[in-house]
Image: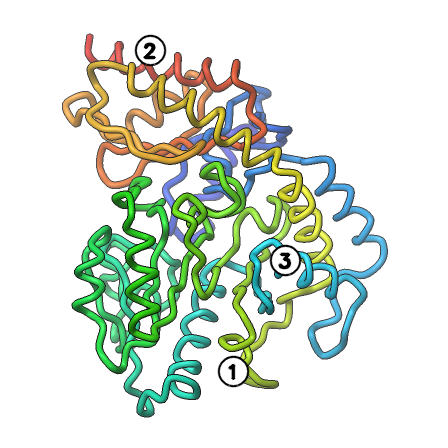
Amino acid sequence: MNSEELIRLSESHSAHNYHPLPVVISSAEGAWVTDVEGKRYLDCLAGYSSLNFGHGNPAILAAAREQLDRLTLTSRAFYHDRFAAFVTGLSELCGKDMVLPMNTGAEAVETAIKVARKWGYEVKGVAPDQANIVVMEDNFHGRTTTIVGFSTDPDSRDGFGPFTPGFRIVKYGSAEAVREAIDENTVAVLLEPVQGEAGVLVPPDGYLAAVREICTDNNVLFVADEIQSGLGRTGDTFACDHERVVPDMYVLGKALGGGVVPVSAVVANTDVMGVIGPGQHGSTFGGNPLACAVGDAVIGLLKTGEYQARARELGAFLHARLAEMGPGVVAVRGRGLWAGIDIDPSLGTGRQISEALMRRGVLVKDTHGSTIRLAPPLVVSRDDLEWALDQLSAVLREARA
């Protein structure tokens, strides 16, 4: 079937919880994808950073293929031979003691919330059912009912109540707002070191370090949601590394699965993670052999530092070119190989700009009005990245004409 027919059937028989661009991808390699008609596109979204290491990364696929022939699932009712290497490797990568593996990013955030609350009751001494967690405006941590309850995005929140209590929303980027929100029942501050879905919002210099100090001073856990920002995207292994900040908990996902399987995890030291006992949290597929094999391959790629270096170098080129883009670009934000670009609304919505780029062979994603996001796989070549930016420049010229 051609793209038109496949799209018609998809729209007829699936829930409309997404509004995809009208392209039907059938194969991919590296930073490029191909649709069912054979047209190629440069992927500048990378599955919201799930494909940091590119489509079909040979090392990741080799690990997955080998494991598929051996063992894919046992559940955590038993040990399996891939588990120890994965949790040990991820602990070492994060500089922490313990890993709690799950599947999706939202599950990892839910896990972090549960761990933080239990730590608050059992270690900090918060009275039962009184724990609160400080979160940020414009956050995006997933779409479970608990998480959307502390979203400030009406599309995510409206129509899904009643919501779980125990969250205090403050302005992102204001350390003083965090300080003022904390009381004796606060168990954690949960934030994204760079807010991806909000438009790649980078907080002011020193913000993460100030939040770390506030949390330490008040015996509160600093929980960093590095699901989009972590694992090489910003030019360091973690976005927190830019300020040499070490959170109490890392929340990881997306790229941890190498674009092959959903893999997520919460990583913390024993004094925090040790509050979870048998039967208190779990997942049938969390930490399964296939996920561990793929995750271990991802950890191996990150240990070389190659991908972090590529994100730094190509990111510098990306942001230099965007700074020179000229009329039509209102603002540019980002870090590493990741950018949020505010387009002059008079030239079109983010959706319209994305569709124009698609017609030129570049795939991006819009968010919040006239903002588009660029997050190509870290394996993208400089020449291909330059070509994509040329296409953006041409789209803006045409919109101004």
Badge nearest the viewer, 2 or 1: 1
The circle on residue 394 is 2
Residue, far bottom: 128
Q: Residues within 10 Å of mark 1 (few under 14, many from 20)?
A: some
When asked about the image quadrant of residue 59, the answer is top right
Name which residue type carries label 1.
Answer: Val
Left or right: where 200 falls relative to 154: right
What residue does disc 1 label? 275
What is the quadrant of the C terminus in the image?
Answer: top left
The circle on residue 92 is 3
Q: Earlier in the sequence, mark 2 or mark 1?
A: 1
Query: Between residues 112 and 220, which one lies in front from this camera angle?
Result: 220
- Taking the spot 29% from the left edge, 15% from the top edge, the residue there is 325
- Taking the spot 36% from the left edge, 50% from the top edge, the residue there is 193
Residue, far left: 346
Q: Name the spot of residue 264 as percent of width and height, x first.
A: 55, 59
When asked about the image quadrant of residue 45, the answer is top left
Query: Between residues 261 and 158, which one lies in front from this camera angle?
Result: 261
Name which residue type carries label 2.
Answer: Ala
The circle on residue 110 is none
Badge nearest the viewer, 3 or 2: 3
Q: Earlier in the sequence, mark 3 or mark 2?
A: 3
Q: Name the spot of residue 247 as percent of width and height, x first.
A: 43, 61
Color scheme of the displayed model: rainbow
- Taking the spot 61% from the left edge, 50% from the top edge, the residue there is 257
What is the quadrant of the N terminus in the image?
Answer: top right
Left or right: where 2 falls relative to 319: right
Q: Please, what secondary structure does the residue beneath circle 1 have?
A: loop
Vertical placement of residue 174 versus 196, above or below: below
Q: Please, what secondary structure does the residue beneath circle 3 have?
A: helix
